[in-house]
Structure formats: C-alpha cells, structure tokens
Amino acid sequence: MSQAINTLTVTSATKEELIDITGLVQEAISRSTVHDGACIVYTPHTTAAITINENADPAVARDFLLGLRHWGLEKLSFAHGEGNSPAHIKSSIIGCSETVLVDGGRLMLGRWQGIFFCEFDGPRSRQVMIRFV
C-alpha cells in the first residue's frame, strides 16, 4: 500500500552541487506509517538529478562533479537557447530518481552510502518528492 507523496524543498548555493539529503529522506520515513517496503526519491527537474554515492568523505562529491566537468560539455556549442544544455545532459545521465529499500523504518543503504540531490543549474530552490510503497 502506498502513501501520499512527501515533498521536500532543497536549495542549492552554487551552479553545480551535490547535496546530501539522506537525513531528510530518513526523517520522512520516520514520520510515515510505512516500516517495510521501498522508498522512491524523485526530482521533477530537467537540470537536476538524484543519485546514491559515498557520503562519508566530502571529497567524493567534489570529485564526482570534477569528473562530470572533465567531459567538457560546457565547451560545446548547443542549439538550446537557455545555455544550460550541459545541465540537461548531466541530469539525463545521472537520472531523476532512486529507489531504496526500507526495513524496520530504516533506509537500507550501505555503510558509506547516502542519497544526493544533484544540482546542475543552480543556485535554485528545487523539489524532491518521496513516496513509500
């Protein structure tokens, strides 16, 4: 049985940024009546993404963004008039959602894993939607 969608607001401070939202997602689970199942974390934005990666060392998030920048997308001449085609491409490659198992009211993430909101066209305020099934 699924529940209503929980919507979080995430605000980025820079053009590109990984924001650890693991605690926010866990808080939403704690307020829910779902104790076992799956948690879908989704963002409805075409220049942002959701990913799971290491959250123990902040250097990993910096390296993640450095690796994406190394592709050199910003150097290409795109037809899209807003000038944010690299952000659209990064969003599509990373993806707009992740699904995490929930057991006993806890996210079943690995020891070093966290859930990140990926901003590729900030700074902005964005929505992240969470649904438990």
Image: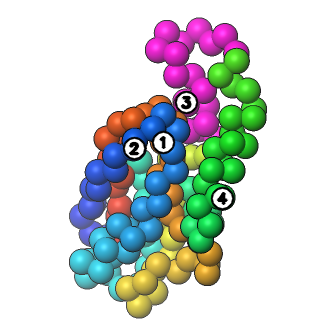
Query: In which quadrant is the N terminus drawn?
Result: bottom left
Badge 3: how crowded within 10 Å, few (<14), some, or many (20+)?
Answer: some
Indicate the position of residue 71 as horizontal and vertical percent values.
75, 32
**Residue at coordinates 43% horizontally, 34% vertically from top-left?**
122
Q: Name the residue at 73% across, 27% down.
A: 72
- Give the residue at x 48% y 34%: 15
Pointer 4 and pointer 1: residues touching (CB < 8 Å)? no
Residue 88 magenta-highlighted:
yes
Identify residue type, mark 3: His
The dot on residue 60 is 4
Magenta region: 76-93
Residue 14 higher or lower than 130, as above or below? above
The x, y position of residue 30, in whole percent, is 30, 80
Going from the N terminus, do you reach mark 2 or mark 4 first?
2
Determine the CA span between mark 2 and mark 4.
Answer: 18 Å
Relative to 88, 127 lies left or right: left
Q: Which amino acid does label 4 sit on?
A: Val
Coordinates of residue 21 in the picture (x, y in percent) = 42, 62
Q: In the rendered view, does 67 fall on the left or right side of 22?
A: right
User: For residue 88, which numbered disc appears in the image?
Assistant: 3
Q: Which of marks 3 and 1 is nearer the N terminus?
A: 3
Q: Nearer the viewer, mark 3 or mark 2?
A: 2
Q: Is residue 87 magenta?
A: yes
Q: Quadrant of residue 56?
A: bottom right
Marks 1/2 in contact by CB < 8 Å: the verdict is yes
In the foreground, 19 or 92: 19
Report how far apart the C-alphas of labels 4 and 1 lie in the structure.
Answer: 15 Å
Question: Which residue matches tag 2?
Answer: 12
Q: Name the residue under label 1.
A: 119
Report the amino acid beneath label 1. Answer: Glu
Q: Inspect this view and state whether residue 84 appears.
A: yes
SS of the residue under disc 2 = loop
